[in-house]
Image (cartoon, rainbow, N blue to C red):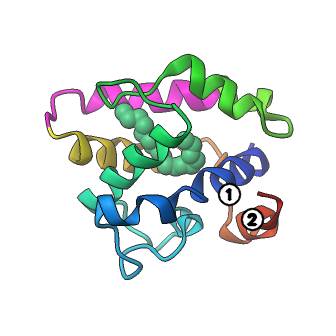
Amino acid sequence: TAEVMSHVTAHFGKALDECREESGLTVDILEGFQNFWREDFDVVHRELGCALICMSNKFTLMQEDARMHHINMHDYIKSFPQGELLSTKMVDLMHNCEKQFDDIEDDCTRVVKVAACFKMDAKKEGIAPEVTMIEAVLEKY
Ligand code: BOM
């Protein structure tokens, strides 16, 4: 659900500041991770892909090949309130997107494409959160 996704985004997004330097993702491009879900934010920057890899590694959500670690991602999402309602769906959506861009060799470029695909599909599925929902739970993490 969008409510659960707002919690996952709020928690995951806290790792952004630790990853700015190594990823090169400037505040100009993305000020706070909650803005990932904004209608007018285009998920296109390679630096965002690099940041997502760095952030995922903070929570061991990716394998060595910069693909999702299915079990850890499932458990991570389940750790949030009502997370079990979203975990299978989210892992399925992400994996479906991964498969579509598997031929891209550059990890940062591939991951940002996967993220854009995931944003679009999450919207279609009605599980994309509003930025205001994320901001309402940011202080919990
Ligand atoms: O093959 C790479 C798989 C990982 C892709 C990461 C996509 C992340 C989408 C960004 C939105 C995030 C909202 C919550 C984060 C949960 C990880």
> Which residue, as the protein is rendered here, is positioned at the far top?
71
Q: Is residue 67 among the parts visible in the rendering?
A: yes
Figure check: 107 above or below 52:
above
Report which residue position mark 1 lands on: 10
Amino acid type at image mark 1: Ala
In the rendered view of the protein, which quadrant contains the N terminus? top right
Report which residue position mark 2 lands on: 138
Figure check: 29 above or below 101:
below
Q: How many marks?
A: 2
In the rendered view of the protein, which quadrant contains the C terminus? bottom right
> Which residue, as the protein is rendered here, is positioned at the far bottom?
28
Asked if the residues shown at circle 2 and circle 1 are in contact, with their CB atoms under 8 angstroms apart, the answer is yes
Q: Secondary structure at mark 2?
A: helix
Residue 117: quarter of image: top left
Coordinates of residue 103 in the picture (x, y in percent): 16, 28
Local crowd size for mark 1, using a 10 Å CA cut-off: few (<14), some (14–19), many (≥20):
many
Figure check: 77 above or below 108:
above
Coordinates of residue 57 in the picture (x, y in percent): 45, 38
Residue in front for this viewpoint, 134 or 13? 13
Magenta stretch in the rendered image? 88-105
| Residue 7 in the figure: left or right of residue 24 | right
At 61% from the left and 59% from the top, the residue drawn is 14
| Residue 59 in the figure: left or right of residue 112 | right
Amino acid type at image mark 2: Leu
Q: CA distance from mark 2 to mark 1?
A: 5 Å
At 13% from the left and 34% from the top, the residue drawn is 105
- Asked if the stretch drawn in magenta spans residue 93, the answer is yes
